[in-house]
Amino acid sequence: MAKSQKGKAIAGLVLGILSIPASIFPLFGLPMGVLGIVYSVKGMKQSEGMAVAGLVCSIIGLILTLINSIWGTYLGATGQHALVNKMMK
């Protein structure tokens, strides 16, 4: 049981770290951030240090993903997004 809990903490940490650069692409950053939070919380029993680090990184990645999503939606809705403008022509 202890090994699987430590594995969950490691998985949460890895997903949390990866969710930060993946926040550039919200389609990847959102699931990584959410899964990182879930695995970090489940791994808190055995490996608290790694689990807390994973939780912090996952939350940061999730916040960056949400900011990027909101910003992209705003730009697209107001016609300021270069890709949307290119597609509309």
Image (spheres, rainbow, N blue to C red):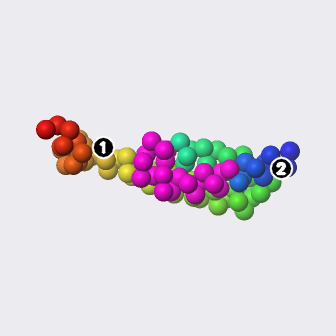
Count how many numbered circles sit on residues in the image: 2
Q: Quadrant of the N terminus?
A: top right
Q: Name the N-terminal-most of marks 1 and 2.
A: 2
Answer left or right for 26 relative to 38.
left
Where is residue 59? Give x, y as percent: 54, 54
Q: Name the foreground residue: 52 vs 2.
A: 2
Tell me if mark 2 has few (under 14), some (14-19) or many (20+) residues whose alpha carbon lies within 10 angstroms of its own. Answer: few
Q: In the drawing, what numbered circle is on residue 45?
A: none
Residue kind at label 1, given as amino acid type: Thr
Q: Nearer the viewer, mark 1 or mark 2?
A: 2
| Residue annotated with mark 1 | 73
Answer left or right for 35 relative to 29.
right
Report the predominant secondary structure element of the magenta stretch.
helix
Q: Is residue 27 above or below residue 56?
A: above
Q: Is residue 31 above or below residue 10?
A: above
Magenta segment, which residues?
11-30
Residue 63 can be seen in this image: no
Residue 13 can be seen in this image: yes
Tell me if mark 1 has few (under 14), some (14-19) or many (20+) residues whose alpha carbon lies within 10 angstroms of its own. Answer: few
Which residue sits at x=78%, y=52%?
6
Where is residue 73? Give x, y as percent: 30, 43
Q: Quadrant of the C terminus?
A: top left
Where is residue 77? Give x, y as percent: 23, 41
Q: Is residue 18 magenta?
A: yes
| Residue annotated with mark 2 | 3
Which residue sits at x=43%, y=45%?
26
Q: Is residue 68 magenta?
A: no
Q: CA distance from mark 1 to mark 2?
A: 42 Å
Which residue sits at x=83%, y=49%?
3
Q: Name the foreground residue: 27 vs 87.
A: 87
Which residue sits at x=23%, y=48%?
81
Which secondary structure, mark 1? helix
